[in-house]
Amino acid sequence: FHNQSRFTMTMRPLLSLLVTVVLLFQPVASLQTVSANSISATFTLYDNGSSHIGIEMEISFDQFHSYVASSNVDDITPSEAFAIEMSSHIEVSKYMAPKPVIATRAYREDGELITDFDQLLPNDSTSQNRRVYLVAEGLEFVWPFVEYGYNQTVSDKVVPPTPGTGRVFLESLSETPRVFRVYNMATEEEANAIIETALSKTGDGALKRSTVGSAKGTDGGIDAKEDRGRTSENSWDYDSPAAKKMIARSFQLTNIEEDDGKRDGLQVVRYIPGQGYNIHPDYFTTQDDSDFDFHPYSGGSNRFATVFMYLNEPEEGGNTVFPHTSDIGSLDDVPQHALDMFSPSSWERSITEDCYTKLGVPPKLGTAALFYSITPDGQIDASSHHAACPLIKGTKWGANIWIWNKQRYGDLRTGEPRTIQMKNQCDEDVYISWERKDNGVIKPGGVLQMNSYEHHRFKASFGSHRGEKIAEFTVQSEPVEGQDWIIKPPRQHGLHASTSSTNDNNDVTNSGVEVEVINEKDYKVCISWEGNEFVTLGAQMKTVLNTFENHVFAAAWPACGFKPFMEYRVRDSKKTDLEN
């Protein structure tokens, strides 16, 4: 078929469901004809982290390398050009982003970033076609679930094999929340070294009662305090040789470039019988700090993934349990001697029941639990709440690291003074912000010079300084003077995108409208516009929004960033009740 690409829409089987295959043919103007002598690759294309719907693609070596030329962008890489081109064949997800969403990275099923055509060829060991996952600009790769119990070997180029244990691989346990059991994450020697380092620490660094805390203190850091719901002991290990290996391996596993500003440190924890950690999330919300953007989909930063490594095998108990998953057992499975350790009304007894009836990851030396606090489309995942099951017998040692998608909250580092020149190459005004604060507007073709500091991160947006991010810049240590930030127009689909195209969903007029919003819920609701928090309404409260026709507002609970339970497009009517 000349000047056509072939693809097959497939629904991945769920357990024993029948696979339905529908063969479709769709002309694509930018794809070149595949000659009989050209090498071609067939692979299945998916959205980031998707498990069920894929499109079968076939492209040639020449086509792969033609995408750079057809993009009309000077500094584009083959990797980015391939991802942008593939975005025209499947819907790419990014919460609250205008359609179509453009992907700028594509990953293989084993975690490799696609940079070369040869990576699309079938797996050498199994001869199976590759699976390719598209990641929207500004988001991070999330390992796909596929199906319960599915094992995925991680590429040696992503996580080098652990000496003495073999290649790292993941076992899929849950799609929502996204949970994996990771094998061969650490050797027994590495685990013992981390334990010995923790036991050898004295003074402020020694093992002590674990704390909780997320609120910002008076010094700008995160307040921590003891809590009845967390009874373990912990210490921190930032620089021992074994800790450095675990930190590096965790960044590799999540496909995020290692950066001290994107982690909280390696926390080492010890549990003795009766100790555990009540249900809690790892992510932050605007309830922790309303001045910080915790939403990755809008350019913010949050704990993206948690890697919890098990350093030994206790005799009984100590699972990492996810109470918001479906039941996998009954209360009859709970040992009576475990229940008898705790009073009937205690959180420990309640969690112990969950530990035998809900999904959990058991502690086994050298393995790890990997779970995500952020969904593939950039939202906070409220279902990722988890708990440390109270230990029944023995001693449990673990080490965990929280990986952030960007510079972490509580570590807004300010280094030495630096100067930046910001140049707007877009054809409309660009709004500059730093940590959600207005830092000026640059006219088309204009330049803004700003005095700043190392590590500060700026965002560029259209429409307002709280609008959707189109670019960002982190101030570097070098050069000291005149760091340049060239703000370019957002990526398009190459030849598939028209320069005069419009988005039917963004047909905003200049007609001003007042909208009265009444919250008839018995809890507070967060109202957002274009992914940014607009106002929080308390129970039975109301407010008036000054806005425009066709603006779309979303209502979410318990905070913006969670999946909205209602959306409202401003029309001729002046009133909507949040009661359904």
Image (cartoon, helix red, strand yellow):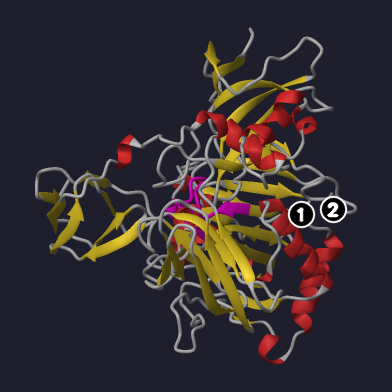
| Viewer-side residue, 418 vs 85 | 418
Can you tell which mark lies on residue 440? none
| Viewer-side residue, 6 vs 159 | 6
Residue plotted at (63% across, 32% down): 70
Q: Is residue 113 visible?
A: yes
Question: Quadrant where the N terminus lies?
Answer: top right
- The amino acid type of the residue labelled 1 equals Met
Q: Which residue is mark 2?
A: 162
Q: Which residue is mark 1?
A: 185
Residue 111: in magenta span = no
Position of residue 76 measured from the top left corner of the image (x, y, whole percent) = 67, 44
Q: Is residue 219 above or below residue 566?
A: below
- Helix, strand or loop at label 1? It is loop
Q: Is residue 231 left or right of residue 208?
A: left
Label 1 crowd (10 A; few <14 / some 14-19 / many >=20):
many
- Quarter where residue 275 is shown: bottom right
